[in-house]
């Protein structure tokens, strides 16, 4: 068993049981434990279902690799509640749907939603998809202006680009060096990029 996954699942279940309240606690526990994917899939489309129930169903289906959860998980990844975003990102990473990188890139690069881009950025890093590096570069470029307040998202972009180790990120990481809060991470990320032959050749 993976202790990190077990801890996430326990925190997720506890949070949604509190949200469900006394009236929905038993139903929440049942949905969190059921092995019936058809029932979970019905929860996603049945009218009148509360958000906590849809989240349980989407998370369970996503972690089981059932692509019927994809649309619901993308909506949760774009939610204002960071805890919902985090569990959706985890389930999307487990789901391995080929549509996920494009959806995460669209959310990360939406300048109107920069405040909620942290988990899409982290998901793009984890996915290591062709869309990941261009999306992280574009997101970081948009956050380097002095008036942009979302430094945690910018930092996640810097760290992600370092982990992905693609030399296309070099210009934007160099631009991040003078920014307070990013300089150390940017220097570390630059150190993880491949050194080209031109840079190592003697003059």
Image (cartoon, grey):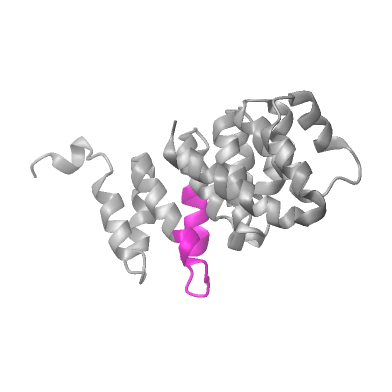
- Outermost residue on the bottom side: it is 147
Question: Is 150 covered by the magenta stretch?
Answer: yes
Q: Position of residue 62 (x, y in %)?
A: 64, 32
Magenta region = 136-154
Residue 98 in which image quadrant: top right
Residue beneath the point at 74% across and 44% down: 28
Residue beneath the point at 36% across and 53% down: 171
Q: Position of residue 42 (x, y in %)?
A: 83, 31
The quarter in which the N terminus is drawn is: top left
192 or 18, nearer to the observer: 18
Q: Position of residue 93 (x, y in %)?
A: 54, 35
Residue 116 in which image quadrant: bottom right
Q: Position of residue 41 (x, y in %)?
A: 78, 30
Residue 93 in sight from this viewpoint: yes
33 or 185, nearer to the observer: 33
Q: Along the horizontal axis of the image, is 105 left or right of 201?
A: right
Residue beneath the point at 69% across and 25% down: 35
Q: Compared with residue 92, is residue 151 higher up or lower down, i.e. above or below?
A: below
19 or 132, nearer to the observer: 19
50 or 34, nearer to the observer: 34
The quarter in which the C terminus is drawn is: top left
Which secondary structure class fits the magenta region best?
helix
Q: Along the horizontal axis of the image, is 179 left or right of 194?
A: right
Q: Along the horizontal axis of the image, is 164 left or right of 130?
A: left
Question: Is 39 covered by the magenta stretch?
Answer: no
Residue beneath the point at 76% across and 53% down: 20
Residue 105 in sight from this viewpoint: no
């Amino acid at each position: 068993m993976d202790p990190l996954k077990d801890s996430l699942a326990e925190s997720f279940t506890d949070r949604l049981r509190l949200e469900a309240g006394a009236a929905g606690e038993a139903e929440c526990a049942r949905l969190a434990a059921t092995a019936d994917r058809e029932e979970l899939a019905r929860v996603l489309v049945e009218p009148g279902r509360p958000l906590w129930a849809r989240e349980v169903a989407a998370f369970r289906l996503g972690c089981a690799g059932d692509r019927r959860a994809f649309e619901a998980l993308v909506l949760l990844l774009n939610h204002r509640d960071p805890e919902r975003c985090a569990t959706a990102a985890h389930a999307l990473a487990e789901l391995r749907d080929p549509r996920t990188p494009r959806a995460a890139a669209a959310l990360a690069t939406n300048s109107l939603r920069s405040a909620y881009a942290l988990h899409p950025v982290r998901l793009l890093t984890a996915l290591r998809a062709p869309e990941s590096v261009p999306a992280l570069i574009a997101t970081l470029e948009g956050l380097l202006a002095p008036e942009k307040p979302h430094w945690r998202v910018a930092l996640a972009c810097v760290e992600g680009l370092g982990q992905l180790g693609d030399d296309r990120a070099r210009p934007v990481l160099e631009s991040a060096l003078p920014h307070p809060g990013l300089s150390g991470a940017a220097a570390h990320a630059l150190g993880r990029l491949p050194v080209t032959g031109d840079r190592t050749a003697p003059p």
